[in-house]
Image (spheres, grey):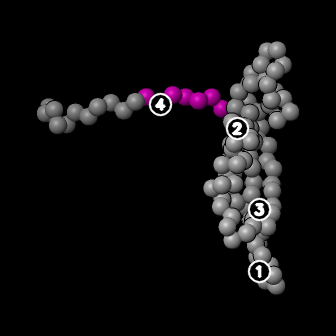
Amino acid sequence: MHSTYLHPRPPQARFKPYSKFPACYKDMAFWVSPEFSENNLCELVRSIGGDLVEEVTLIDNFTNKKTGRTSNCYRIVYRCGQAGRAGAGGEGRRGAGCG
Protein backbone atom coordinates (compact mmCIF):
# COMPACT_ATOMS: atom_id res chain seq x y z
CA MET A 1 0.00 0.00 0.00
CA HIS A 2 1.30 3.46 -0.85
CA SER A 3 1.81 6.02 1.91
CA THR A 4 -0.55 8.38 0.08
CA TYR A 5 -3.41 6.08 1.08
CA LEU A 6 -2.54 6.14 4.78
CA HIS A 7 -4.37 8.77 6.75
CA PRO A 8 -3.47 9.84 10.25
CA ARG A 9 -5.88 8.51 12.81
CA PRO A 10 -8.35 11.17 14.00
CA PRO A 11 -8.20 12.00 17.70
CA GLN A 12 -10.49 9.87 19.80
CA ALA A 13 -13.61 11.55 21.06
CA ARG A 14 -14.07 11.46 24.80
CA PHE A 15 -17.43 10.49 26.19
CA LYS A 16 -19.07 13.23 28.24
CA PRO A 17 -21.60 11.72 30.65
CA TYR A 18 -25.18 12.87 30.40
CA SER A 19 -26.54 15.00 33.20
CA LYS A 20 -28.52 13.14 35.85
CA PHE A 21 -30.66 16.23 36.33
CA PRO A 22 -33.62 17.35 34.20
CA ALA A 23 -33.48 20.58 32.23
CA CYS A 24 -35.11 23.71 33.61
CA TYR A 25 -36.73 25.97 30.98
CA LYS A 26 -37.30 29.67 31.52
CA ASP A 27 -38.93 31.87 28.88
CA MET A 28 -38.15 35.57 28.70
CA ALA A 29 -39.96 38.08 26.45
CA PHE A 30 -39.08 41.72 25.94
CA TRP A 31 -39.39 44.58 23.46
CA VAL A 32 -36.30 44.98 21.28
CA SER A 33 -34.80 48.14 19.84
CA PRO A 34 -33.34 48.37 16.33
CA GLU A 35 -29.87 48.19 17.96
CA PHE A 36 -30.66 44.86 19.69
CA SER A 37 -28.07 42.13 19.15
CA GLU A 38 -28.94 38.49 19.76
CA ASN A 39 -25.24 37.69 20.17
CA ASN A 40 -24.95 40.24 22.98
CA LEU A 41 -27.96 38.69 24.72
CA CYS A 42 -26.46 35.20 24.48
CA GLU A 43 -23.11 36.43 25.81
CA LEU A 44 -24.84 38.16 28.72
CA VAL A 45 -26.95 35.12 29.63
CA ARG A 46 -23.91 32.82 29.48
CA SER A 47 -21.75 35.23 31.48
CA ILE A 48 -24.33 35.24 34.29
CA GLY A 49 -25.52 31.62 34.10
CA GLY A 50 -22.13 30.08 33.35
CA ASP A 51 -22.05 26.32 32.83
CA LEU A 52 -25.67 25.99 33.94
CA VAL A 53 -26.86 27.54 30.65
CA GLU A 54 -27.25 24.80 28.08
CA GLU A 55 -29.10 26.68 25.34
CA VAL A 56 -30.57 30.07 24.43
CA THR A 57 -33.17 29.96 21.63
CA LEU A 58 -35.53 32.47 20.03
CA ILE A 59 -38.94 30.78 20.26
CA ASP A 60 -41.32 33.59 19.30
CA ASN A 61 -41.30 36.96 17.60
CA PHE A 62 -44.15 39.47 17.52
CA THR A 63 -44.44 42.86 15.80
CA ASN A 64 -47.25 45.18 16.82
CA LYS A 65 -48.83 46.45 13.59
CA LYS A 66 -49.98 49.75 15.16
CA THR A 67 -46.73 50.73 16.89
CA GLY A 68 -44.21 48.81 14.81
CA ARG A 69 -42.51 47.61 18.00
CA THR A 70 -41.09 44.09 18.04
CA SER A 71 -41.04 41.67 20.95
CA ASN A 72 -38.81 38.59 21.08
CA CYS A 73 -39.29 35.62 23.37
CA TYR A 74 -36.24 33.50 24.23
CA ARG A 75 -36.13 30.15 25.98
CA ILE A 76 -33.16 29.66 28.27
CA VAL A 77 -32.41 26.03 29.14
CA TYR A 78 -30.56 25.48 32.39
CA ARG A 79 -29.13 22.12 33.38
CA CYS A 80 -26.67 21.02 36.00
CA GLY A 81 -24.05 18.91 34.25
CA GLN A 82 -22.43 17.25 37.26
CA ALA A 83 -23.93 15.20 40.06
CA GLY A 84 -21.55 16.57 42.69
CA ARG A 85 -21.54 20.18 41.57
CA ALA A 86 -22.63 21.58 44.94
CA GLY A 87 -19.62 19.94 46.60
CA ALA A 88 -19.35 17.60 49.53
CA GLY A 89 -19.40 20.45 52.01
CA GLY A 90 -22.51 22.03 50.53
CA GLU A 91 -20.66 24.89 48.89
CA GLY A 92 -21.55 25.76 45.34
CA ARG A 93 -24.49 27.15 43.43
CA ARG A 94 -27.42 25.45 45.12
CA GLY A 95 -29.78 28.37 44.52
CA ALA A 96 -29.14 28.16 40.78
CA GLY A 97 -30.82 24.78 40.36
CA CYS A 98 -28.05 22.26 41.07
CA GLY A 99 -27.67 19.74 43.81
User: Disc 2 residue type?
Assistant: Gly
Q: Which residue is mark 4?
A: 13
User: Disc 1 residue type?
Assistant: Gly
Q: Quadrant of the C terminus?
A: top right
Residue 32 drawn above or below residue 86? below
Instruction: Give residue 84's position: percent from left, percent from top.
Output: 74, 21
Task: Specify the quadrant of the image occupied by residue 64.
Answer: bottom right
Residue 1 drawn above or below residue 31? above
Disc 4 to disc 3, how far (Cα)? Answer: 35 Å
Q: Which mark is residue 68?
A: 1
Instruction: Give residue 53's position: percent from left, percent from top.
Output: 71, 42
Disc 4 to disc 1, how far (Cα)? Answer: 49 Å
Instruction: Give residue 87's position: percent from left, percent from top.
Output: 77, 19
Q: Which residue is mark 3?
A: 73
- The part of the chain drawn in magenta is 12-19
Exactly how many numbered labels are in the figure? Answer: 4
Q: Quadrant of the N terminus?
A: top left
